[in-house]
Image (cartoon, rainbow, N blue to C red):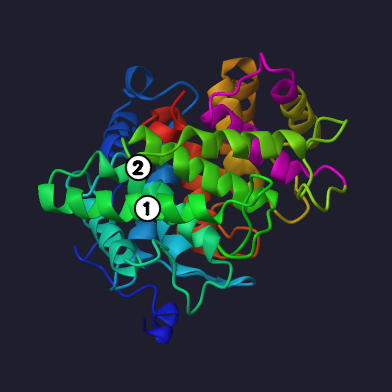
Amino acid sequence: MNPTAAAQPNTRRRDGGRRAAGGAVACALCAAVAGQDAPLLPRGVTPEVVQAVAHGLDYLARSQARDGAWRDAGGYGTYPAAMTGLAGMALSAAGSTPTRGRHWREVREAVEFLLHLADARTGMIADLGTENRNMYGHGFATLFLASVYGMEEDVVQQEKLHGVLTRAVSLTVRAQSAAGGWIYTPDSGGDEGSVTVTQVQALRACRMAGIVVDKKTIDRAVDYIRKCQNPDGGISYSLGRRGASLPAISAAGVAVLYNAGCYDDEPFVERALRYVKQHVSATGNTTGHHFYTQLYFAQALYQNGGGDWDSYYAEMSAWLVRNQRKDGAWEGDRVGTVYGTAIALIVLQLPYALVPIYQR
């Protein structure tokens, strides 16, 4: 991998002009401009949101590197697999697939990059030269590839994806700790909340796509999150270290519990959601992890539905519109603009329900 590529993010403009939004979002933008937004826009989505999404998608399209990757070199280093996975999910949430949609080319090149990055021997999908906490990259990359697997129309490419995803699942299963969680590298034997929720969501996406995943692996992970819950309902950093409940980890935990089929009729999930709603707001800084928290808090509230989601989305979308940069990007949690922009776009596009793992 070329280490200088991280310094060359804005290297491609295929059409010589501004890029429009992809798929369903493009249709919504046209309708909004024509004054016909009411019958076409999902509930809560305003013309201002549609414009912000279009601008953000433009930014991601411009900032993809020649090799198909996205790289942010923020305060946490360079994570091409993680950033490419997140950016790919944002484009997929706009309705683009590897073969269709305004940003089909960017999605396809992202898929090709991750397929090339995947280790055929170990199953790891990450750049081991730069991603020292490579299970994050592995999780986000697996999530994205599983999400586009069912959209791929080329049989040969489908077979490649199937092989990569099957090996990726095998690595994730092997890396699960005795306690049921995961940590930064696959051979550490430890566990902590943020990596665990990334792996659970990736496994669920694979299962939804038809990749074989042993349900026992997901059940053990759900039990791990359950055991990390404190008496106040929140979820701590890890089972071994315990400590105080963390709003960011708690929000992520609730989202993946919903993904795993655990809902509010289970007392521990209800307590966790109540804790998150008490400690997280749409516009408040969450101990330096605001964008990360909103990525999962938004999913949890969207899947839960009702008035809580309506109120949250109105406030969150307005905040994101206000805080979008002129170039279409959002800076997120000191990680970088690809990270912040991808998360903002995923949150804003949840009402379109175009990605299976984000659907109710």
Q: Which SS type dominates the magenta stretch?
A: helix
Image position of 13 (left or right of 55): left
Q: Is residue 326 visible?
A: no
Label 2 and label 1: CA atoms lie apart by 9 Å
Residue type at mark 1 is Gly
Along the line of sight, the residue nearer the viewer: 321 or 266: 266
Q: What x and y, as percent, mark residue 205?
A: 41, 39
The N terminus sits in image quarter: bottom left
Residue wearing tag 1: 88
Q: Is residue 346 magenta?
A: no
Q: Which residue: 47% across, 59% down?
A: 138
- Residue 147 is tagged as 2
Residue type at mark 2 is Ser
Q: Which residues are magenta?
A: 244-270
Closer to viewer: mark 2 or mark 1: 2
Q: What x and y, as percent, mark residue 216?
A: 53, 35
**Labelled pair 2, 1 in contact (Cβ < 8 Å):** yes
**For residue 128, above or below residue 61:** below
Q: Residues within 10 Å of mark 2 (few under 14, many from 20)?
A: many
